[in-house]
Image (spheres, rainbow, N blue to C red):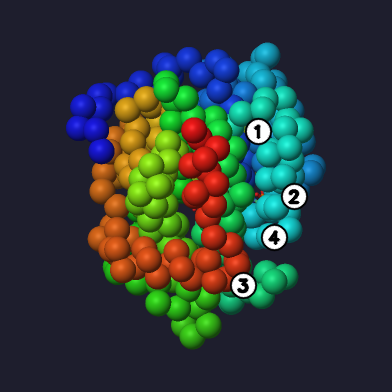
């Protein structure tokens, strides 16, 4: 981890991103949308992915209206559906998109408000874990080779995992990842985010071992809420009551500002594999380096989560193939 990163980072003045291509999951709303907007404003080509065609089309139109001349396209991708992930990744690998290289991917899609009772996906996995963690593990495996191929002497492609400050609130060791025993909405969310962070750190260790020039980085957006976020038609349209209620939460920030940490993790030339970025004042503020919770950084927890994802998905990350592709 570089110690020389600038303490200050101006989220309004990003390094030019012309010529770079990034894919963002869950891009039709919230932090995912604003991440795309900030990347597009800086000149990047952005692949906005989402699970619903209408919501995705609305977000695409909104982004084009807010960033005239933006280079942006859409990709249908439901991260809770392995078939959808494979199909979407195959399109990216097959070069169906405007750019043939992929300089980074943001694993943003997530269920923030978990269902009150345990729900499962079509393939029988607990829904919150499957959406937030397992689906991105599968997507990471599917996109590792195109990411590695895009490495150059000037740029190491990145994957950014969305962590959460909630992982500091108690240990939440993910012993029962599918929550078959003790499901609660809070437990499902926090445990999934411990798993995401553990995957992000473990991915970094594995990529380094294989000497792969792809960085795995984690970013958490603090506490970012819709009622403090600019109105964007079809993307963020909070009621008056929500604006009022959210306005009374001084520790919160907008989702636009929540996207700052994600964007820094992705584009700051000094962002390194294994870094953990978060807002300066924990729940709000400009992005700075922080530390992941002890549980998610625990090598034993990381190994168990990684192996559980391999077992549940039947997928092993193709690190050797990616290393050959990077040469
Ligand atoms: N906001 C915070 O304070 C906060 C704090 C810590 C971490 N985070 C993390 O930041 C990320 C974004 O949060 P947010 O606040 O922006 O949430 P949000 O406004 O609820 O947006 C979530 C996005 O994820 C998408 N999504 C959900 N399930 C999906 C699936 N199966 N396939 C594809 N996309 C799916 C949603 O699409 P639909 O519109 O189709 O549902 C939406 O685009 C999440 O990973 C969250 O855990 C947020």
Q: Is residue 281 visible?
A: no
Q: Which residue is mark 3?
A: 125
Residue 66 located left or right of residue 97: left
Pointer 2 local density, CA inside 10 Å: few below 14, some 14–19, many at least 20 = some
Regarding mark 1 in the picture, which secondary structure is present there? Answer: strand
Q: Which residue is mark 1?
A: 47
Q: Quadrant of the N terminus?
A: top left
Pointer 1 local density, CA inside 10 Å: few below 14, some 14–19, many at least 20 = many
Asked whether the beta carbons under mark 2 and mark 1 sit within 8 Å of each other, the answer is no
Mark 4 or 1, nearer chain start = 1
- Ligand 1 within 8 A of label 4's CB? yes
Q: Nearer the viewer, mark 2 or mark 1?
A: 2
> Which residue is drawn at the image coordinates 43% and 31% (left, top)?
156
> Which residue is drawn at the image coordinates 25% and 24% (left, top)?
6
Residue 57 located left or right of residue 160: right
> Which residue is drawn at the image coordinates 35% and 49% (left, top)?
209
Q: Nearer the viewer, mark 4 or mark 2?
A: 2
Front residue of this view, candidates 260 and 206? 206
Q: Position of residue 47 (x, y in %)?
A: 65, 33
Q: Which residue is mark 2?
A: 87
Q: Which residue is mark 4?
A: 81
Asked whether the beta carbons under mark 4 and mark 2 sit within 8 Å of each other, the answer is no
Q: Position of residue 40 (x, y in %)?
A: 58, 22
């Amino acid at each position: 981890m570089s110690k020389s990163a600038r303490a200050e980072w101006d989220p309004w003045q990003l390094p030019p991103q012309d010529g770079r291509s990034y894919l963002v999951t869950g891009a039709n709303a919230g932090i995912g949308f604003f991440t795309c907007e900030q990347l597009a404003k800086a000149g990047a080509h952005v692949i906005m992915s989402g699970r619903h065609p209408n919501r995705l089309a609305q977000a695409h139109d909104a982004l084009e209206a807010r960033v005239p001349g933006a280079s942006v396209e859409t990709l249908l991708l439901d991260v809770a559906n392995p078939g959808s992930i494979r199909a979407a990744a195959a399109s990216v690998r097959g070069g169906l998109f405007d750019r043939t290289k992929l300089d980074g991917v943001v694993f943003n899609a997530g269920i923030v408000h978990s269902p009150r009772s345990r729900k499962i996906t079509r393939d029988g996995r607990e829904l919150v874990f499957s959406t937030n963690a397992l689906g991105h593990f599968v997507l990471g495996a599917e996109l590792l080779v195109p990411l590695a191929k895009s490495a150059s002497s000037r740029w190491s492609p990145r994957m950014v995992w969305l962590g959460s400050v909630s992982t500091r609130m108690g240990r939440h060791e993910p012993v029962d990842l599918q929550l078959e025993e003790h499901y609660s909405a809070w437990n499902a969310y926090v445990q999934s985010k411990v798993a995401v962070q553990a995957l992000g750190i473990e991915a970094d260790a594995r990529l380094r071992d294989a000497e792969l020039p792809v960085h795995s980085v984690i970013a958490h957006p603090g506490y970012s809420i819709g009622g403090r976020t600019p109105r964007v038609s079809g993307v963020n349209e909070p009621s008056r009551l929500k604006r009022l209620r959210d306005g009374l939460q001084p520790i919160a920030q907008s989702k636009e500002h929540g996207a700052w940490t994600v964007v820094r993790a992705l584009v700051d030339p000094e962002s390194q594999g294994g870094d953990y970025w978060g807002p300066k004042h924990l729940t709000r503020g400009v992005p700075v380096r922080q530390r992941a919770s002890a549980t998610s950084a625990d090598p034993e927890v990381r190994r168990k989560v990684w192996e559980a994802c391999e077992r549940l998905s039947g997928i092993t990350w193709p690190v050797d193939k990616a290393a050959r592709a990077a040469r």
